[in-house]
Amino acid sequence: MRLSALLPMLLSTVVTLPALAQGAPRYLDLVNHAHNSVVSLQVAAHGQVNYAPVSLDGALRGGGDSQTIALRGEACRYDLRFDFADGRALRYEDVDVCRYGKLRIRPFPPGVQDREYVVRAK
């Protein structure tokens, strides 16, 4: 094989190495089965307190609307905080995005009046 044929392959390998060092994005499908729309999302590595906002493509409507988000970082386990249009929040702790590619956002349990409800992975 000629060197001119190998050069594009070698260059593409060199160009992708910095991207791998930063951590390839992990994709997570969100499906909103809650009754209200999710208006914002924040994510942190599991157990951390520094949540970072994640852009949504508009509100994630209740009743089954879905979106796919990309998470960048080395971690597999994240805490996700969903803010709803009614002012309440639902926080999922210890979500393994490497193992599971989909998260079904559930409705608040009946009778729960708390402003923030926490769901812990089992």
Image (cartoon, rainbow, N blue to C red):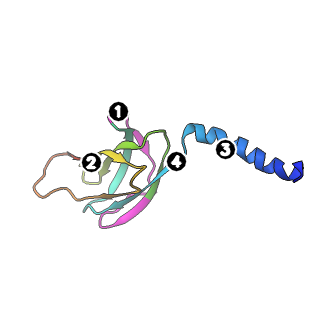
Tell me how far mark 4 sits from mark 3, CA to CA.
13 Å
- Residue where numbered disc 4 is placed: 25
Q: Which portion, as a residue range, is magenta?
A: 47-67
- Residue where numbered disc 3 is placed: 16
Expressed as whole percent of the image width and height from the top left, the position of residue 96 reads: 37, 47
Circle nearer the N terminus (1, 3): 3
- Residue where numbered disc 1 is placed: 48
Q: Is residue 26 magenta?
A: no
- Say if 109 sits above or below 96 in the image: below
* Contact between labelled residues 1 and 4, with CB atoms less than 8 Å apart: no
Q: Is residue 53 magenta?
A: yes
Tell me how far mark 1 sits from mark 2, CA to CA.
16 Å
Give the image quarter of residue 64.
bottom left
Tell me how far mark 2 sits from mark 3, CA to CA.
34 Å
Kind of residue sitting beneath label 2: Ala
- Say if 114 sits above or below 109 in the image: above
Q: State the residue at coordinates (77%, 50%).
A: 9
Circle nearer the N terminus (4, 1): 4
